[in-house]
Image (cartoon, helix red, strand yellow):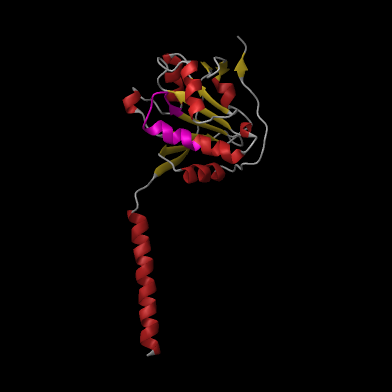
Amino acid sequence: MIIPLIRALVLLAVATLVFAVVAAAAEPERYKRSVEQYTMPDVVLINQDGEKVRFKKLLESEQPVVVDFIYGTCTTICPILSAGYANLQRKLGTDTTKVRLVSITIDPEYDTPAILKEYLARYQAKPGWDFLTGSRRDIDRVMNAFDAYFRDKMDHKPLTFIRSPKDGKWIRLYGLLSGIDFLDEYKKAGFTVTPGLSTKAAVPN
């Protein structure tokens, strides 16, 4: 009686393991991750406060930098990306400027600083999160630098980029990340949510 029982338990354990492996293989990939090296253009963009921002200097920081591409009237991809930013800022507590969050519009013809500011208010954005616009030419240069050129709003794709200040490389995330996924990727990049300091890269008028 004991041997058949052991054999049955072993078979059950093997079947369970096989099922778990098959289920994991069948699970669709939520997002794609790669590590890239990008060269940023030295363009001047405009933030939600109407301030000129030297883009290259803003990103080449000693802080962690996260970048995404959104636009003010977006109702599909953008709310999910922005919710990830808002969640990270909540996790940072009172020192939200420890991480530099940068959103870049892909609709600069419509997205004025006032619209950017209104958009950020919807997500209760705190200091450390900037939404940038600029000329179509400069926005296109930025998109091309990230290998993320969108022909128009209908061509919009879910992309998030995390830059490590240690080596300047970027983690490229393609897909809609859950809040947990986003925080996990942030931690994988070697970052924590403890308080820190920031600098501002605004260009005088």
- At 37% from the left and 68% from the top, the residue drawn is 16
Q: Is residue 190 left or right of residue 116?
A: right
Horizontal and vertical percent for residue 142? Answer: 46, 22
Residue 156 location, quadrant: top left
Quadrant containing the N terminus in the rendered view:
bottom left
Horizontal and vertical percent for residue 123? Answer: 50, 31
Can residue 142 be seen in this snapshot? yes
The residue lying toward the viewer, choosing from 63 and 73, is 73
Q: In the image, is residue 79 part of the stretch drawn in magenta?
A: yes
Horizontal and vertical percent for residue 93? Answer: 62, 38
Residue 14 location, quadrant: bottom left
Can residue 160 be seen in this snapshot? no
The span shown in magenta is 69-84
Figure label count = 0
Residue 179 higher or lower than 42, as above or below: below
Quadrant containing the C terminus in the rendered view:
top right
Horizontal and vertical percent for residue 96? Answer: 61, 33
Residue 163 location, quadrant: top right
Q: In the image, is residue 154 part of the stretch drawn in magenta?
A: no
The residue lying toward the viewer, choosing from 63 and 46, is 46
- At 39% from the left and 77% from the top, the residue drawn is 10
- At 65% from the left and 25% from the top, the residue drawn is 199
- At 33% from the left and 60% from the top, the residue drawn is 22
Q: Is residue 104 left or right of residue 96?
A: left
Pick out the residue farthest to the bottom.
1
